[in-house]
């Protein structure tokens, strides 16, 4: 079965997530949507969403749904109530990826369509204390465009990047794996990262 504008799809789909009730949530470039198997529910800025141009969606263990927008803002929907957070400097993000760790920490990895030190332009962010904050990456990785963030079976956090290989965080320390260390290439995809993290 195919879905398009005629059948209710709001726009280009950047991410989707199946929640614990079996509903499918979509992040599109025109709205956030939920599909329950029969009909669409659409959310826009008129409902409280920070932006209609979305890049990622996830559900955290407390039941909240999170949406990352291309302008760096992040919205949270909890029990019908919307909240907006400034997640990053306004920029156009080609991809954003969420990861909630086993200790409840929510991470967001950013792949920006422009590169450089422009203040609040982060590669990786963490939600804590009611706000998003930058996660400092190893200096040798420079500005990293993040393709994916996952947690391995041992609790380590793995970050796949473009041009900077893989970053791994375990026991309070980062390690950097790339062509310079002879371990892995510089451009690491999401599927490649998941294979690496499961080996640990």
Image (tube, helix red, strand yellow):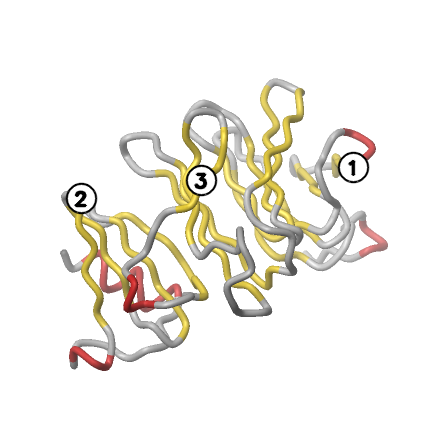
Q: Secondary structure beneath disc 2?
A: loop
Residue at x 34%, y 72% (from the top left corner)? 164
Q: Do the CB atoms of the residues marked 3 and 2 lie less than 8 Å apart?
A: no
The label nearer to you, 1 versus 3, is 3
Closer to the camera, 153 or 41? 153
Along the line of sight, the residue nearer the viewer: 99 or 144: 144
For label 1, the crowd category at 10 Å Cα-Cα, with few meaning under 14, some 14 to 19 and many 20 or more, is few
Q: Quadrant of residue 123?
A: bottom left
Residue where numbered disc 1 is placed: 45
x 53%, y 44%: residue = 17
Q: Badge 3 is on which residue?
A: 133
Distance between mark 3 and mark 2 Cα atoms: 17 Å
x and y percentages locating residue 104 in the rendered image = 34, 30
Which residue in the protein does label 2 denote?
172
Comes first in the chain, label 3 or label 2? 3
**Residue 170 x %, y %:** 17, 48
Quarter-of-image position of residue 74 = top right
Name the residue located 48 percent from the left edge and 52 percent from the top edge. Answer: 97
């Amino acid at each position: 079965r195919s879905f398009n504008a005629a059948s209710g799809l709001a726009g280009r789909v950047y991410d989707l997530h199946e929640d614990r009730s079996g509903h499918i949530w979509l992040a599109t470039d025109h709205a956030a949507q939920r599909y329950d198997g029969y009909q669409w529910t659409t959310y826009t800025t008129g409902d409280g969403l920070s932006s209609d141009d979305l890049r990622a969606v996830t559900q955290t263990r407390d039941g909240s749904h999170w949406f990352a927008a291309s302008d760096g803002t992040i919205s949270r929907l909890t029990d019908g109530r919307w909240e907006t957070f400034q997640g990053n400097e306004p920029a156009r993000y080609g991809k954003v990826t969420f990861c909630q760790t086993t200790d409840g920490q929510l991470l967001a990895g950013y792949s920006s369509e422009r590169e450089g030190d422009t203040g609040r332009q982060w590669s990786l962010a963490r939600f804590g204390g009611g706000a998003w904050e930058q996660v400092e990456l190893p200096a040798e990785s420079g500005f990293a465009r993040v393709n994916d963030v996952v947690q391995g079976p041992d609790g380590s956090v793995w970050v796949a990047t473009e041009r900077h290989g893989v970053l791994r965080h375990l026991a309070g320390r980062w390690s950097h794996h790339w062509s310079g260390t002879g371990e892995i290439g510089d451009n690491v995809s999401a599927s490649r990262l998941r294979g690496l993290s499961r080996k640990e």
